[in-house]
Amino acid sequence: MLITVSGPPGSGKSTNAAGLADRLGLDHVSGGDIFREMAAERDMTPVEFNEFAEEDPQIDRDLDRRLHEIATTRDDLVLESRLAGWLSADHADFRFWFDAPVSTRAERIAEREEKPVDRAKAETERREASEKKRYREYYDIDIGDLSIYDAAYNTARWGPERFIDVLVATIDAYDPATDEGKAPIEGVSYDF
């Protein structure tokens, strides 16, 4: 089973994807972790690295190629990244979108990265604008188009343990006999 988890920064992707993978006995791969490692290798913050990626498209393409390859060749996995749902093409069994109010997301990021909330919020908004522009330019992906996802959740409504219960219940309730088809991924240029 391949499950993708996507959403904006601070939406709870990493926490909940890891918890879901653990609960289901699946592997977990985090695009955000890979991105942060790439930034650290260059002594940059994720925001600085995002802005650098605007100037060097190969950074996004390298990360996205790697995630696309994982999504299309592996199984028994929860793949989590901003574009995981899109990059999985039609290979994902479930595509989830997580979100939360920007104030909540900024608080989560501020706590994780030990910085003031207002700074986290400003950086997050810059980062989102940067990524939105690049995804459209590189792959013709509208990150705001949630039509490809099987379910979208506001993660601020549940704590992590309860939210994982919600996700597991969603997966458990799935009946292939009544499945009328997942949303296809169309019009995307996987030009890595």
Image (cartoon, rainbow, N blue to C red):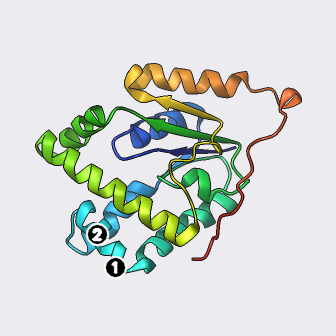
Q: Is residue 173 visible?
A: yes
Secondary element type, mark 1: helix
* 46 with respect to 110 (left or right): right
For the point 63% across and 71% down, which residue is it?
A: 190
Question: On the image, numbered disc 1 is attached to which residue?
Answer: 55
For the point 31% across and 57% down, which residue is it?
A: 127
- Expressed as whole percent of the image width and height from the top left, the position of residue 135 reads 49, 64
- Expressed as whole percent of the image width and height from the top left, the position of residue 76 reads 65, 46
* 71 with respect to 52 (left or right): right
Question: On the image, numbered disc 2 is attached to which residue?
Answer: 51
Amino acid found under the numbered disc labelled 1: Glu
- Examine the rendered structure and indicate whether residue 41 appears above or below residue 83: below
Q: Which quadrant holds the N terminus? A: top right
- Expressed as whole percent of the image width and height from the top left, the position of residue 12 reads 39, 37
Give residue 100's quadrant in the image. Answer: top left
Amino acid found under the numbered disc labelled 2: Glu
- Expressed as whole percent of the image width and height from the top left, the position of residue 57 reads 43, 78
